[in-house]
Image: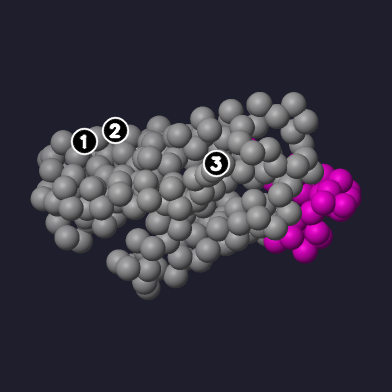
Amino acid sequence: METHLNPLPFFFSIFFTIYIIAYFFLFRNWSPKIRPEASSCAISFAHGTPAVFLASGAIFSDAGRGFASPNTDLQNSVLEYSIAYFLMDLLHYLVFFPADVLFIAHHLVTLFVFFTCRYVVSHGAYAILVLLILAEITSFCQNAWTLARARRGDVEFAGRVCDLLSPPFYVLYSIVRGFFGPYFLYKMGEFYVNGGAESVIPKWLWISWIFVVATAISVSILWIMNLWIELYRERSSKMEKKKGR
């Protein structure tokens, strides 16, 4: 009898294993305060960049791709891969940072988009995967920056890495989240508003997708703006100290 492995539990087990290895072995000598965050970065490393390549392959392998096109098997697998990651990271926040309502809400609404695209309508994966690419294309740099930032107070090298990564990471993140993301969301919304998917994606659902993505992009823009302000203040403070010597 032929059996098929259910991708979602399989992918979840991979991320769970990576998290456990990172927490109990890779970062075992790190401060208990930052070990959970570092372990979250570990599973993000395992998801982000691979998701960009997987999603790109799933999109370009579909000759009929479009905002209302049916999901291919490969596209569904990529959605399940990302669902597994967000479920694992959501578990991480619920265990270690239950008061972090913003991130928990972000993961819940992201899961809503992936789940409905994969299991409710089975259409629209093209749009969701492009948005996934735009969200994750900066993840490798962001995770490296996050780890360096977490250790910069007690490891000099980490501080240097953080200082080195901050400007290029901020620039890349600003371009992707401030320009490409909003532009693609506009094209996506324009298609749906004009009724391009009315026969396969209910109006309430695509409106929910647009709202979730628009909110996520807005929060991302506010986050990077605060980081730019913080960087400016840090650099200004350092210059003033040098002048005062």
Quarter of the N terminus within the rendering: top right
For mark 3, give the secondary structure: loop
Residue type pointed to by label 1 = Arg
C-alpha separation, residue under disc 2 versus residue under disc 1: 6 Å
**Nearest to viewer (mark 3 / mark 1):** 3
| Highlighted magenta segment, given as a residue range | 179-208
Q: Residue at x 71, y 49 (%)?
A: 122
Residue 174 can be seen in this image = no
Q: Return the residue at label 1.
A: 160
Picture layout, residue 226 above or below residue 63: below
Measured in 3D between alpha carbons, the distance from the residue under mark 3 to the one under mark 2, in whole angstroms, is 53 Å
Q: Quadrant of residue 26?
A: top left
Marks 2 and 3: in contact by CB < 8 Å?
no
Residue tagged 2? 164
Foreground tag (3 vs 2)? 3
Q: Is residue 46 above or below residue 121?
A: above
Q: Are marks 2 and 1 in contact (CB under 8 Å)?
A: yes
User: Which amino acid type is marked by label 3?
Assistant: Glu
Going by the image, does 144 lie left or right of 194?
A: left
Q: Is residue 181 or residue 235 the one in the foreground?
A: 181
Q: Position of residue 23 (x, y in %)?
A: 22, 53
Q: Which mark is residue 2?
A: 3
Query: Mark 2 packing: few (<14 Cα in 10 Å), some, or many (20+)?
Result: few
